[in-house]
Structures are given as structure tokens and as C-alpha cells.
């Protein structure tokens, strides 16, 4: 399952490291846009298999931020 950016902004904080287990609903990444923090939660439980961004990166709406298997 791919975690996608819900809006354009900067990656403010990465909460879960690649290889870690995540639970459904757990925040994985926090984006910052227009001085607001936008959490990106896991839509299912699993392992964070791939992290496509780093803190400070700019992302566009729909960009794949991470992959959970």
C-alpha cells in the first residue's frame, strides 16, 4: 500500500523509520503546508518497506511518500 501526500508541502517530520512496524491509523509522516501540520497516517498495519522522502523535501499532492507491506 502506498502512502500519498494529501496536499503539496514540505516533509516536516518522519515518525516511523524504514523497516519498522506500523499500525493502522498511526501517523507515519507529518507534512507542513501554509504553517499547518498535516499528519499522514497508515491506512493499514504492516511494515514500512520503503521511504521515498527525507525531512525537508518538498512534495506535491499525490506523490508517493512511503510504501507499507
Image (cartoon, grey):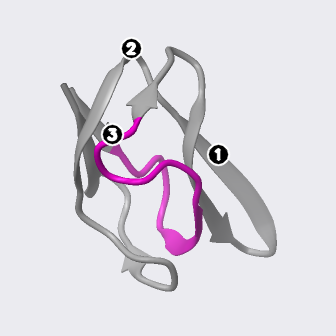
Tell me the number on the disc at residue 39: 1
Q: Which residue is mark 2?
A: 44
Q: Which residue is mark 3?
A: 3
Q: Label 3: how many residues lie within 10 Å, few (<14), some (14-19) or many (20+)?
A: many
With respect to residue 27, does 33 lie above or below? below
Count every numbered label the image shows and give the total: 3
Q: Earlier in the sequence, mark 1 or mark 3?
A: 3
Q: Earlier in the sequence, mark 2 or mark 3?
A: 3
Q: Look at the image and give the residue range highlighted in magenta.
A: 4-20
Q: Quadrant of the C terminus?
A: top left
Snapshot quadrant of residue 61: bottom left
Residue at x 33%, y 39% (from the top left corner): 3
Snapshot quadrant of residue 45: top left
Snapshot quadrant of residue 31: bottom right
Q: Residue furthest right?
A: 35
Q: Nearer the viewer, residue 16 or 32?
A: 16
Secondary structure at badge 2 equals loop
Amino acid at each position: 500500500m502506498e502512502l500519498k501526500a494529501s496536499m503539496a508541502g514540505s516533509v516536516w517530520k518522519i515518525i516511523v523509520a524504514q523497516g519498522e512496524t506500523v499500525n493502522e491509523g498511526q501517523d507515519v509522516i507529518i507534512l507542513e503546508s501554509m504553517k499547518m501540520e498535516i499528519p499522514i497516517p497508515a491506512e493499514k498495519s504492516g511494515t514500512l518497506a520503503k521511504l521515498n522522502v527525507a525531512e525537508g523535501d518538498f512534495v506535491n499532492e499525490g506523490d508517493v511518500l512511503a510504501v507499507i507491506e
